Image (cartoon, rainbow, N blue to C red):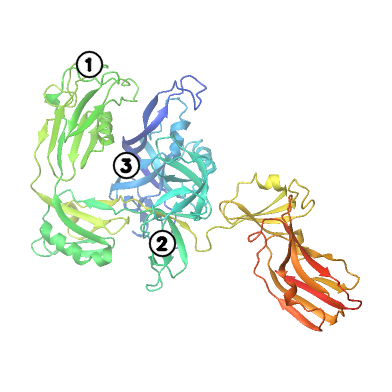
């Protein structure tokens, strides 16, 4: 629970280990300028995510309502916070927490927008965090860094200006990142969501739930792009129902809940679906019976004889309160570097050069070891860190590689299954990847595990936090606090899909040069269509997501607000223009009031003429035929019509006409009234 008067988190951390976990293409700008059409640059895989191991210094404070009164520590580090180097001011966002305790945190951090990669003054595209002293902090919704107090180690003279500039340059509320594989979006595209395909699409007449305009794209293969959202984006939510594009409503049956069932007010458009957090224990137990630990603040009392099965039962009894369920799974199996198996050629510059990389299959998946070290003096080598990265990039089910130290490679089967390595192509020195006299010093196989441990799964992306209450079951079962589910993200629409704008332009040409979003309006000062129509007259337009639609103009404001009237006498001409109305109008009532009967064979009919650049034929009796009007008898004659001008007819202003045949009449008078909307 958050309270208004809790102090900011400004936690000092010492980063002791960094290893890349994911790469994206980067082009080596050795021959400036490098243009988009330049075929010379060769894409180089560069890390944009890293696993960092941090020691945590407790931040003391004086609030009694924080998780631990008077202190913030490693248990208070959460996904969405940032990690900044106290010397350089460079910052990375924490996107996953793999484990945390009061004194240490292992997290995955990301170079958001690859800002640090492209900022690298060495020209080598190195965006990685280095070992050293950092601060963990948050940012406000407006993109302002929240670092208070300054960490105990202090900051460099350039820290403040560098980190301030970084967050002023890119603000997540104005350039929000989204991902969709193989998208073809370009800058300034208007993006909507499609709930049927759970995808992002170009806005059109069928897809009108606009979420924003594209502000930048990454390379053509990565799938990342950013939008300027039309409303506030609410990020790092543990849960949202549904998938991308779904409209999420306030529940009408469960107060405070969200649902996909319409009825309540619309609250969000789903931009990113959540996945569950998962924590695997690292020890099989047992613990002493009746020992107590907490999951997310709820006490779990281990019954029975304190076995892993007893802990499982106790956990699931409280899952309704914690949102965490447990299951038994095999402990992981792993293999790591054995120095006795490493070749004497290990470390030779040509061993893992990109020109002749070694290959191997791990559990049937091919891995090519073509990532070389970026460390000075080792640029032609594949150290354990680079080997681990190549393995992780291969996406082998249940296989995770790491480098516990500079010269040790570890491969883990997280599901407890077997590990089988089959050497493929050796390097240029005929050195294989694994086995005897190999580059990695790994054995070629390991059997599956037979011992079970606890696997905890959250109902959503919430953190799974463990704490001892009585005894030490956290250590006995090796319980690991994590926050590793993907957080949900939603576009907040409770106050409407977006706030539209009205733009004033000088003419219709300028109108068509606008880049509107659905609902935007425009006031055109001079609506001259180039054919002499509407010269000097204003008009109002509404954008429906596909085209501009005229909603009103000078004529509709000046004439449509009152009825058209004409007094008919024996002196009237045979062809009469009663008045003009604009396109998009409908005549609601026509009244002919005969005050003095005509004493001859006079007749009257009322029609219309559309005033186009090439006017179509007039419709003399299209509104009221002569059969309805008897000019020889006093009285009031009325009719209505359902003609919508501009829809049932061609576009263009309309002249209401009448055809009068005097006949033999010498006296007579009638009033014609045409009302319309």
Instruction: Tell me the element at label 1.
Output: loop
Earlier in the chain: of badge 1 and badge 3, it is 3
At horizontal 8% and vertical 39% (from top left) the residue drawn is 447
**Residue that badge 1 annotates:** 428
Q: Quadrant of the C terminus?
A: bottom right
Frontmost residue, 24 versus 641: 641
At horizontal 23% and vertical 64% (from top left) the residue drawn is 319
Which mark, by number, is residue 54?
3
> In the rendered image, is residue 53 in sight?
yes
**Which quadrant of the view contains residue 264?**
bottom left
At horizontal 78% and vertical 48% (from top left) the residue drawn is 532
In the drawing, does residue 427 fall left or right of residue 248?
Answer: left
Q: In this picture, is 64 found above or below 59? A: below
Residue 497 location, x and y as percent? 52, 59
Earlier in the chain: of badge 1 and badge 2, it is 2
Which mark, by number, is residue 12?
none
Instruction: Tell me the element at label 2.
Output: loop
Q: Residue furthest bottom?
A: 634
Of badges 1 and 2, nearer the viewer stands: 1
């Amino acid at each position: 629970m958050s309270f208004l008067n809790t102090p900011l988190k400004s936690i000092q951390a010492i980063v002791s280990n960094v290893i890349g976990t994911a790469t994206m293409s980067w082009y080596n700008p050795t021959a400036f300028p490098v243009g988009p059409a330049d075929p010379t640059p060769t894409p180089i895989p560069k890390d944009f995510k890293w696993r960092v191991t941090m020691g945590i210094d407790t931040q003391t404070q004086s609030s009694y309502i924080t998780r631990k009164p008077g202190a913030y520590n490693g248990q208070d580090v959460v996904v969405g916070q940032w990690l900044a180097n106290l010397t350089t001011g460079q910052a990375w966002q924490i996107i996953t927490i793999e484990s945390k305790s009061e004194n240490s945190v292992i997290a995955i951090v990301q170079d958001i927008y690859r800002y640090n990669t492209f900022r690298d003054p060495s020209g080598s595209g190195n965006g990685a965090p280095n070992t050293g002293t950092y601060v963990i902090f948050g940012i406000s919704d407006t993109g302002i860094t929240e670092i208070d107090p300054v960490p105990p180690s202090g900051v460099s003279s350039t820290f403040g200006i560098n980190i301030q500039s970084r967050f002023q340059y890119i603000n997540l509320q104005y350039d929000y990142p989204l991902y969709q594989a193989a998208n073809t979006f370009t800058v300034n595209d208007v993006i909507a969501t499609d709930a049927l395909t759970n995808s992002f699409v170009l806005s059109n007449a069928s897809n009108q739930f606009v979420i924003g305009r594209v502000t930048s794209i990454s390379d053509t293969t990565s799938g990342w792009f950013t939008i300027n959202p039309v409303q506030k984006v609410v990020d790092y939510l543990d849960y949202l129902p549904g998938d991308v594009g779904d409209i999420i409503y306030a529940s009408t049956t469960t107060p405070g809940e969200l649902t996909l069932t319409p009825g309540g007010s619309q609250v969000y458009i789903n931009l990113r679906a959540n996945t569950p957090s998962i924590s695997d224990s690292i020890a099989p137990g047992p613990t002493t019976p009746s020992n107590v630990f907490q999951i997310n603040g709820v006490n779990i009392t281990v019954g029975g004889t304190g076995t892993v099965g007893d802990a499982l039962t106790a956990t699931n009894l409280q899952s309704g309160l914690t949102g965490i369920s447990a299951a038994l799974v095999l402990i992981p199996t792993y293999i790591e570097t054995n120095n006795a198996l490493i070749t004497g050629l290990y470390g030779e510059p040509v061993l893992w050069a990109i020109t002749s990389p070694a290959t191997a299959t791990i559990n049937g998946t091919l891995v090519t070891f073509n990532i070389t070290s970026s460390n000075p003096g080792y640029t032609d080598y594949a150290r354990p860190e680079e080997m681990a990265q190549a393995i992780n990039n291969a996406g082998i089910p249940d296989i995770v590689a790491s480098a516990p130290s500079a010269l040790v490679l570890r491969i883990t089967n997280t599901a407890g299954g077997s590990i089988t390595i089959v050497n493929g192509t050796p390097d240029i020195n005929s050195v294989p990847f694994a086995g005897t006299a190999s580059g990695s010093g790994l054995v070629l196989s390991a059997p599956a595990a037979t011992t079970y441990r606890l696997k905890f799964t959250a109902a959503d992306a919430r953190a799974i936090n463990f704490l001892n209450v009585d005894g030490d079951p956290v250590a006995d079962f090796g319980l690991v606090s994590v926050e590793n589910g993907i957080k949900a993200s939603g576009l907040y629409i409770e106050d409407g899909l977006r706030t539209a704008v009205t733009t004033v332009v000088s003419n219709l040409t300028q109108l068509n040069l606008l880049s509107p979003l659905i609902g935007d309006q425009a006031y055109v000062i001079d609506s001259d269509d180039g054919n002499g129509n509407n010269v000097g007259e204003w008009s109002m337009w509404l954008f429906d997501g596909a085209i501009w639609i005229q909603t009103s103009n000078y004529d509709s404001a000046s004439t449509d607000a009152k009825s058209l009237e004409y007094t008919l006498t024996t002196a009237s001409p045979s062809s009469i223009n009663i008045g003009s109305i604009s396109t998009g109008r409908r005549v609601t009532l026509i009244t002919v009031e005969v005050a003095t009967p005509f004493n001859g064979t006079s007749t009257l009919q009322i029609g219309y003429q559309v005033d186009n650049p090439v006017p179509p034929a007039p419709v003399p009796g299209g509104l009221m035929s002569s059969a309805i009007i008897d000019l020889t008898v006093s009285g009031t004659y009325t009719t209505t019509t359902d003609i919508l001008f501009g829809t049932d007819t061609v576009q263009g202003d309309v002249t209401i006409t009448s055809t009068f045949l005097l006949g033999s009449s010498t006296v007579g008078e009638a009033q014609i009234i045409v009302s319309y909307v």
